[in-house]
Amino acid sequence: MDEMNQEMSEMPNVSVGDVLTGKVVKVEDKQVLVDIGYKVEGIVPISELSSLHVEKAADIVSEGDELTLKVKKMEDDEIVLSKRAVDAETAWEDLEDKLETGEVFEAEVKDIVKGGLVVDVGVRGFIPASLVETYYVEDFNEYKGKTLKLKVIELDREQNRVILSHSAVVEDENDARKQSLLQSLEAGQVLEGTVQRITDFGAFVDLGGMDGLVHISQLAHEHVEKASDVVEEGQHINVKVLSVDRDNERISLSLKDTLPGPWEQVEEKVRPGDVLEGTVRRLVNFGAFIELLPGVEGLVHISQIANRHIATPQEVLEEGQTVKVKVLDVNEDEKRISLSIKELEEDQSRAEVEQYTKDDDSGFQLGDFIGDKLNKLK
């Protein structure tokens, strides 16, 4: 009798609401038995193991685990305990701190439900579909078991409501990258980017956190009708930074400035004596500018346009006209090419005369004939 009284006196005095520690001695499908040093083992029903739905108790605990538990109910020789209640109390305090500080934390997606994702944060946390990503997601199945970075958006303890957001974390990270990029960029830098969008006025290029604009005039050395003629979405290109407007978060870029210039190695493509076809681009009072290659123009001086005196180039030529020209001189450094239409016509006349005299067996003197021809040219 004395031994029984001694045992009773050593047993803890347990009341509803107490928090105590126990060791798992048996794990059954729908409940867990825990030794809390009391005259009977405590029971933790499967519904009291977690704030989320649990199929088997073994998914949550194992024999030998030390658990902190709250006494939910005591009647006769049965004591009902809750792990969920202790976890929830700690979780709510932690979540309230996280809401106040804006702390970013990680949690695993436990379930996919209508309208969003469910995570275990000590209590049931919900991520609405609209707060999962910064873009539309059609199928959320791949998110199950995935660990996401989250922020607390809304808490209501009475309603047991915990709203979390992953997209808010992504937006913050994007903003941080954008600001870092804006501060690091300087005019003149050459960077690699990815073409994101093509518009009527150019192409937006992702520089790794922020888009910059390559205006259509900066896509190529020659005239561009449509940006899609030069670049395509997803393409990786090198671009040069033209200017950075940090206040308005605008970056101007150039693709053209990273490409070989139209005049580069032009002396290998255009040589004195060459006869080329070109397009009349501009008529000025002293001559005509002829485009020989994309972005490369040469000048036919007014004195080299015709074999007769002309007052203006417009008497003979018009803009957009295709003409043949002879190259007189090429200066790559000064980006200057001298051309002649007159010399080409004279060369052609000489060739015609030579061919005529070669074919003619009459007694005419060659010198007389050439003199006559040249007088006509004059």
Image: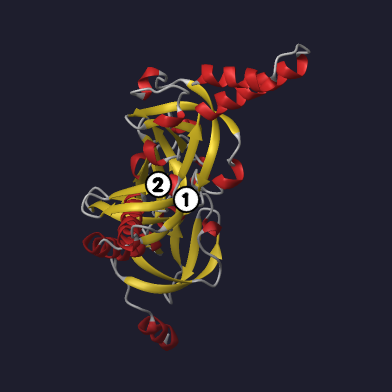
Question: Would you say residue 255 is visible in this rendering?
Answer: no
Query: Viewer-proximal residue, 256 or 50?
Result: 256
Residue 163 higher or lower than 196, as above or below: below
Q: CA distance from mark 1 to mark 2?
A: 7 Å
Q: Position of residue 41 (x, y in %)?
A: 46, 68
Residue 81 higher or lower than 66, as above or below: above
Q: Which mark is residue 254?
A: 2
Q: Which residue is mark 1?
A: 258
Label 1: few (<14), some (14–19) or many (≥20) C-alpha neighbours in 10 Å: some
Q: Which mark is residue 57?
A: none
* Whether label 1 touches label 2, CB < 8 Å: yes
Q: Residue, x 32% and y 29% (percent of image)? A: 285
Residue 136 higher or lower than 121, as above or below: above
In screen coordinates, is 43 left or right of 100?
Answer: right
Q: Residue, x 70% and y 18% (percent of image)? A: 365
Label 2: few (<14), some (14–19) or many (≥20) C-alpha neighbours in 10 Å: many
> Which residue is situated farthest in the top direction here?
362
Q: Amino acid at mark 1?
A: Thr
Q: Position of residue 25 (x, y in %)?
A: 54, 69
In screen coordinates, is 325 left or right of 224?
Answer: right
Residue at disc 1, secondary structure: helix
Query: Viewer-proximal residue, 326 or 355?
Result: 355
Query: Viewer-proximal residue, 346 or 278?
Result: 346
Q: Amino acid at mark 2?
A: Ser
Q: Quadrant of the N terminus?
A: bottom left
Residue at disc 2, secondary structure: strand
